[in-house]
Image (spheres, grey):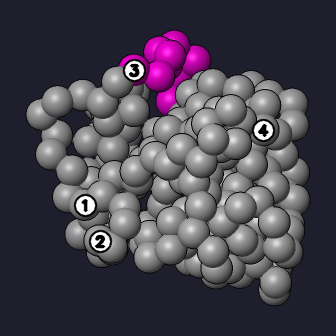
Amino acid sequence: MPASSFVRGGGLAALAAAIPLMAPAVAGAAPLSTSGSTSTTASQPFCSTTELTPEQMAAGVTTQITCYGTLDASLRAVGIDAPKGTTVDNLMSTEGASASGVAAVHYKTTNGSGEYLSVAGSGCDGGGLSFEAGDSWNDTIMATRHRLCSQVKHYSDADYTGNTQTTNGANGTLVLMNGQLTRQVSSIKYQGTMNS
C-alpha cells in the first residue's frame, strides 16, 4: 500500500465522563516503541496516538504511534488518568462507559483483545489516520471498536483511497473488517455523530 500521513491519537476513552481534554504527553512513562520500522510485541501491546485534523491530513502531516508495556502508561501519554484497578477488558468492552477523548480503538485481532491502538480525538469531523509503509499498524487491523465517533471509514490505501469499509455503531460496538479490508487498512477517517 502507498505511504501516507498518519493519524489520530489514542487513549482509552471508556473512562469516566470527567476525562479531561487531550493533554500533551506526560513525562515519566518511557515508551517501549514508536511507529515506523519498529514493531509492537506482546510485551508492548498498549499503543496510542492522536487523530490528525482534516487540515493536517490534507497537508500530509504524520503522527507517530507510541506503544507501552502498561495500560496506564498508554493512557497517560494522551492525557487520561486511568482509575485505580482499571483493566483493559473493562475499559474496552463496557458499552456504558464514557466515550470522551477517544474516537475509536483498533485491534490486530477479531475479538477485541491483544494489541490495540487507541486514537485520541475530540470530534468526528473527518480527521483520521494514515499509516506509513512499514508502520507496525499498516495492513494489520482486523477490528474497530467505536467510541466517540459513530462512523469510521477504513481505506485500503494510505491516501484515503482504494477499497473501503464504513462501520457504524454506538459507543462500545466492535465491528470486524470485511474480507477486502481484513489486514488491509492503511488509512482511516472518523466521522458521524458523537456517541456519549
**SS of the residue under disc 4:** loop
Residue at the disc numbered 1: 33
10 Å crowding of disc 1: few (<14), some (14-19), many (20+): some
Q: Magenta region: which residues?
A: 15-23
Earlier along the polypeptide chain: callout 2 or callout 4? 2
Residue at the disc numbered 2: 38
Q: Are marks 2 and 1 in contact (CB under 8 Å)?
A: yes
Residue 51 locus on image (x, y percent): 57, 39
**SS of the residue under disc 1:** strand
Q: Are marks 3 and 4 in contact (CB under 8 Å)?
A: no
**SS of the residue under disc 2:** loop
Disc 2 residue type (three-letter): Thr
From the viewer's side, name the closer residue of 7 and 88: 7
Disc 4 residue type (three-letter): Gly
C-alpha distance separating marks 2 and 1: 6 Å
Residue at the disc numbered 3: 23
Foreground label between 2 and 3 = 2
Q: Residue at x 76, y 60 (%)?
A: 160
Q: Is residue 115 visible?
A: yes
Residue at the disc numbered 4: 126
C-alpha distance separating marks 4 and 1: 27 Å
Dividing the picture into quadrants, the one containing residue 180 is: bottom right
Earlier along the polypeptide chain: callout 4 or callout 1? 1
Disc 3 residue type (three-letter): Ala
Earlier along the polypeptide chain: callout 3 or callout 1? 3
